[in-house]
Image (tube, helix red, strand yellow):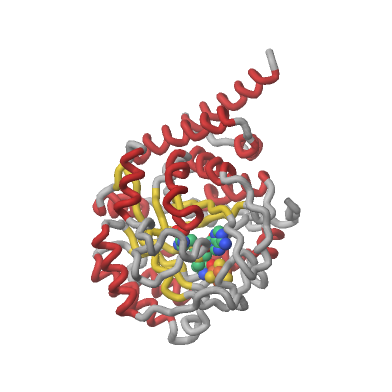
Amino acid sequence: MTLISIEQRYLDDILYKAENGISLSSQEIIHLLTLKDTGSVKKVMKSARKLREQYFTNKVFLYGFIYFSTYCKNHCTFCFYRKTNKLSPRYRKNLLEVVDIAGRLADSGVHLVDLTMGEDPDIFRTDGFDILLEMVARVKDNTGLPVMISPGVVPDDILIKMNNAGVTWYALYQETHNPVLFKKLRIGQSFKVRRDKRLKAGKQGMLVEDGMLLGVGETNADRADSILGMKREGVHQARVMSLVPQLQTPMAGRVVIPRINEYLCIAVMRLVMPDRLIPASLDVDGIKGLEMRLEAGANVVTSIIPPSSSLAGVSQSTLDIEQGLRAVPEVKKILTGKGLEAASADEYTAWTASQKRTKITREDDYDENRDSGRTASGA
Ligand code: SAM
Ligand code: MD0
Ligand code: SF4
């Protein structure tokens, strides 16, 4: 047998396992993530689409994004909004502005409103979170849509209040599941505290999203660990985003890795977690990046931002926003071209309700020590 056919056979075996609900090993995942030739990559994406179709038919969910405060006390090396960056636009939208923008997003047809903030010192004080709690209540009332919050690591009592206020989703991305690399990315922050916060949110009954960054010094083994870590944790939504190097940050000069890495990660995440939500974010390459991410098996479009709202994105602070390209009609055009369609709001709510009924956060299965002693790669 030739070398090529042995390789092809190995790939086919892995894809067969994934398509038939058999768990993939770390070694098999690394093999998939290492693929380079177009034919093999296309095969992986085709399997990913097949699984998406099996679990979600041709329906895609749409998330509106409101980055309502860009102030932050932290120093994440990849982020444009790290405290000391003088270039980043700083603003804090008030309650009425947020409610108004959320209403416009809802009218445009999104299924969820994601309220995101930096770890704003004005909010991270004793009574500051009251504003966020009120915002959640008003946005829910006015739009009738579920709400996701992406507030960073909040105190435990606030997490409980958020859950009681009817927050559906808590988004908190680990970025990497390698604690040594984490320290280089989220300077001065605790790997364990961040992970435990997400686990607590899940335990309380909120749906949770985790995510990983690409092109920040991780190896393929780290990527595989992240994917398996997210699966083990039982997150409801799992994301991958390529680093967009930001001016005046420690990662400004970082070489951008080819996007095929992100597409492969999306596809492999779909193979490993076929029934989870996997976003295609408009915040990396704007609307032109949507097609390939859908092709790779994503089933949620995130970072939809209305024009004339003076709102920013996170990794692409301005791309496609004022031109109205990060908007539902543009997204729908692309979906149609791919034989996909936007779900109805009821279909989305039914999915979240079904997830809330099945408690799958597996804190007890999670071995707290398994990550210790890992080393960061220098890639
Ligand atoms: N401050 C909150 C936090 O950090 O959890 C919420 C802000 S937002 C959700 C931050 C996320 O955007 C990060 O967790 C990271 O995954 C992503 N992000 C930030 N800067 C990025 C960049 N330059 N390129 C790609 N992704 C980025
Ligand atoms: C996105 N810019 O969806 C947003 C953000 C936070 N929950 C999401 C990273 O890409
Ligand atoms: Fe702040 Fe979040 Fe940016 Fe880190 S990623 S600097 S916590 S806004």
Q: Position of residue 107 (x, y in %)?
A: 24, 62
Residue at 39% across / 72% down in the picture?
A: 310
Q: Position of residue 73 (x, y in %)?
A: 57, 78
Residue lying furthest top:
1
Picture quarter with the N terminus: top right
Residue at 57% across / 42% down in the picture?
A: 260
Tell me if residue 28 comes above or below residue 105 in the rendering: above
Q: Is residue 172 visible?
A: no
Q: Is residue 231 visible?
A: yes
Residue at 31% across / 48% down in the picture?
A: 332
Q: Position of residue 21 (x, y in %)?
A: 48, 33
Tell me if residue 39 comes above or below residue 370 in the rendering: above
Residue at 30% across / 63% down in the picture?
A: 105
Q: How many marks?
A: 0
Q: Report which quarter residue 309 is drawn in.
A: bottom left
Q: Position of residue 316 (x, y in %)?
A: 50, 61
Q: Report which quarter residue 128 is drawn in.
A: bottom left
Q: Quadrant of ligand 3?
A: bottom right
Pick the front one: 23 or 99: 99
Is 250 positioned to the left or the right of 44 in the image?
Answer: right
